[in-house]
Image: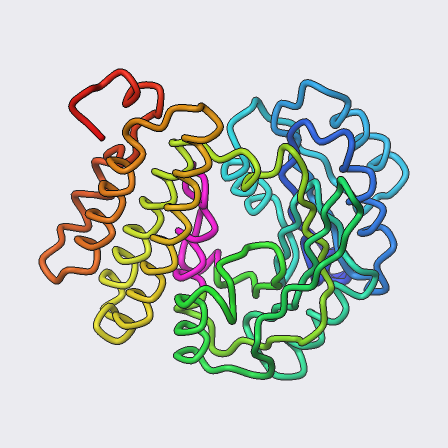
Amino acid sequence: MPGKEDVLAEKENTPEISVIIPVYNVEKFIGRCLLSLVGQTFRSYEVIAVNDGSTDSSGDILRSFAEKYDFIKVIDQKNAGASKARNAAIRAARGKYFSFVDSDDYVAPTFLEELYYACKDYDADISCCYYYFHYIENDLLLEYPFRCKGVLDRTQAMKKLLHDVQIQSLLWNKLYRRELFTDYNITFPSMCFEDIATLDKIFLHANRVVVLDRPLYYYNQHASSTLATISTEKINDFVQSMAMVRLSLEGNGVYEKYKKSFKAMLNKTCGCCHLYIMQIHAEKKCFRGFLANIRRVDRILRELSEEDFDTSAFVRERPDIVAEPQKLEKDYSVR
């Protein structure tokens, strides 16, 4: 049995924040990411980096940092995707708050401090900040403001999250009270756009949210970024994430309350999907079937807003909505 001194020592060593980083083949970026975390003005935190089966030198870089800094912990796993890497880190995390940083991004020196004290000062379960788009190729920084700031109650925050403009469905520019995950068994699904499919569940249980009107996160845009490598699989996951949001709202008995905001989210998703479909057809130089893919997305997103839509069946079956351009190019029944 541990003595009183052991319990007190463990309590004192419990970090306030756990920073969670899934890592896969980012040898060009992970060093800068970790250096930005090592240089934080806030001191009570740990970094849990999950090496998701990297085949480049990412794992070696992680281990070199872990040898130098005792607050950095490395978990190695076979390649299973960012979601499972985050889930593994959550299970190992000791912090009272969670922060998620993508391994090819970096943060301002006061990132953790400002988000932490925003939660503390306003007794909020979530805090979030503005961020920069950092275009690597030409080293261009562009600020994306949320167009809102201050303290929001649960209803206000949920509506802004679902509109996906004033508070975006981004995992990484926020700080979360640990219990939002542990008390409600929140895990990330293995899919693209998993943050969209998950964040509404977290926000539904947050007492209030604080939005800081300062950019503290640097979101790197480069050739291998998620939005720079669009595929039919990612577009289908995007649509699937919308169904998962509706299923969550229905399951928590608040779909009617947030229906208008959810429909606004669907409208934005529709526009994004049109652009993504245009992009994949242009990249493959396959233009036959372009309109067929557009119509398929429009139809399912329209059905997702209808009262009698079977959300559970759609989420369970995960149908492919958008077809590969090469396949449609050979199908003369489509236009």
Q: Residue at x 54, y 72 (%)?
A: 125
Q: Is residue 258 left or right of residue 312?
A: right
Image coordinates of residue 153 in percent, x first then y, are: 46, 82
Image coordinates of residue 198 in percent, x first then y, are: 42, 53
Image coordinates of residue 166 in percent, x first then y, are: 51, 71
Image coordinates of residue 289 in percent, x first then y, are: 28, 30
Q: Is residue 268 above or below residue 51?
A: below
Q: Is residue 2 left or right of residue 325?
A: right
Q: Is residue 335 left or right of residue 61?
A: left
How many discs mark residues in the rendered view? 0
Q: Is residue 267 magenta?
A: no
Q: Residue at x 29, y 28 (%)?
A: 323
Q: Is residue 222 above or below residue 202?
A: above
| Residue lying furthest top | 330
Q: Nearer the viewer, residue 195 or 233?
A: 233
Q: Is residue 116 left or right of residue 269?
A: right
Residue 334, by quadrant, is top left
Residue 233, by quadrant, is top left
The color scheme shown is rainbow
Q: Residue at x 38, y 59 (%)?
A: 268
Q: Which residues are magenta?
A: 181-202
Residue 45, by quadrant, is bottom right
| Residue lying furthest left | 308
Q: Nearer the viewer, residue 269 or 309?
A: 269
Q: Residue at x 20, y 55 (%)?
A: 302
Q: Nearer the viewer, residue 43 or 169?
A: 169
Q: Nearer the viewer, residue 239 or 317?
A: 239
Q: Locate the C terminus by quadrant.
A: top left
Q: Is residue 198 magenta?
A: yes
